[in-house]
Image (cartoon, rainbow, N blue to C red):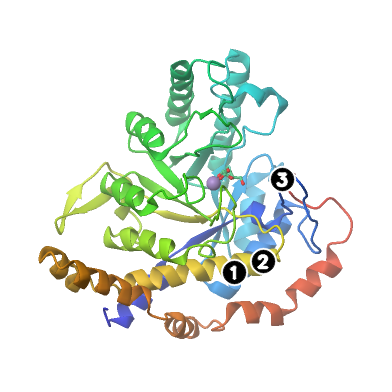
Amino acid sequence: MTTDTAQVKAALRRQRIETPSWAYGNSGTRFKVFAQRGVPRTPQEKIDDAAQVHRFTGVAPSVALHIPWDRVDDYAALAAYARDRGVRLGAINSNVFQDDDYMLGSVTNPDPAVRRKALDHLLECVDIMDLTGSDTLKLWFSDGTNYPGQDDIRARQDRLAEALAAVYERLGDGQRVLLEDKLFEPAFYAMDVPDWGTAYAHCVRLGPKAQVVVDTGHHAPGTNIEFIVAFLLREGKLGGFDFNSRFYADDDLMVGAADPFQLFRIMHEVVKAGGLDAGKNARSSVDGGVRAGPESPHGVAFMLDQCHNIEPKIPGQIRSVLNVQEATGKALLVDAAALRKAQDAGDVLGANAVFMDAYNTDVRPLLADLRADMGLDPDPIAAYHRSGYFEKITAERVGGQQAGWGA
Ligand code: PSV
Ligand code: MN
């Protein structure tokens, strides 16, 4: 285990974790959405809640938007609102999955008029980025088919490629597009972007401003996600994460709750490739050296994509941020030199022991120390509960329509 705690703390201090606006709204399953008290009614109130997560953790200074859930008349004013509360607007997430027209797909729909409508929405999202100053567009498509023979699998790939090319073309300087895959749901036979390989191939064709986003809940059970992460980092194609955890499918539970060891293994690959530092996702470590990859000025985006169906939402987000920090801290503690030595010597047990030593270290005292250094309460959840914010929002947010994505 490495003992350079100053370096570990410095890296943790620099890490940024983005929270999603939709995590603050009501959510649920197709069986029931439970309304919670104090839930935001407007994008502004979601931003207020996100600002609390940043206030107590110090590492969550941005909030992702989902369009149309966060549609407003004046996006520049919304960005200013966020700035006034000490946060900024992060990734813009498109939504081409909640309109009746999209029953048979959005950009891959057999009907050209529906494809045009979906593409117009994606382009509108880039317009919004221009107004908010967001540099990241995140695309997830629910497109796919339920029955063999329902549509032409190859033709749907062609339609997808055409739409992606039009979006890519529209991107301004400093903007990028992240493409997200998902094995199944809502389509049950063949999703059009079912896996990271498909997303990767489209991104390679598009160019350096296109990268893959890995949602940790979107894989087949047993998938080795850290392999995907290592591969994409090596190619300069890991744009970021949608972090959450799952026991069965796309459960969207708090990251690190179901399998903290998996999160550690993922963060180990990120740390090893220099992915904690902005701009380093374009480079990759090969045999200790650095291989030039496609140019990208962006770092790996650590975004949460979660729903707090039964737990309170703001502390749920704080807990998730802390879980990412803990996994990152442990990954930073891996003694890279000792690990390399054992690996080079073919020392299977020795290498595994170095790895597990770091994982088995309790980094909570180090993180508490770091928070004290940053002028924060060492226990962000307790500090939030003491702050009176929950009492305030439950008293104030009465009436109106609570936000939620109506799952
Ligand atoms: C789809 O399951 C997804 O992971 C995409 O990222 C969406 O934007 C998000 O969930 C909506 O909650
Ligand atoms: Mn996602």
Q: Residue 206: x percent and y percent?
A: 36, 30
Q: Residues within 10 Å of mark 2 (few under 14, many from 20)?
A: many
Q: Residue 331: x percent and y percent?
A: 34, 69
Q: Residues within 10 Å of mark 1 (few under 14, many from 20)?
A: many
Where the N terminus falls, by quadrant? bottom left
Element on which disc 1 rests: helix
Q: Is residue 98 left or right of residue 269?
A: right
Q: Residues within 10 Å of mark 3 (few under 14, many from 20)?
A: some
- Residue 387 visible in this rendered orientation of the protein: yes
Report the amino acid beneath label 3: Trp
- Residue 174 visible in this rendered orientation of the protein: no
Residue wearing tag 2? 314
Q: Residue 385: x percent and y percent?
A: 70, 78
Report the amino acid beneath label 1: Ile
Residue wearing tag 3? 405
Residue found at x 64% / y 81%: 383
Q: Is mark 3 within 8 Å of ligand 1?
A: yes
Q: Is residue 122 left or right of residue 344?
A: right
Tell me whether the residue at label 1 lies in contact with that at label 2, contact meaning CB atoms closer than 8 angstroms: yes
Image disc number at residue 318: 1
Name the N-terminal-most of marks 3 and 1: 1
Name the N-terminal-most of marks 2 and 3: 2
State the separation of the CA atoms marked 2 and 3.
17 Å
Residue found at x 29% / y 47%: 231
Element on which disc 3 rests: loop
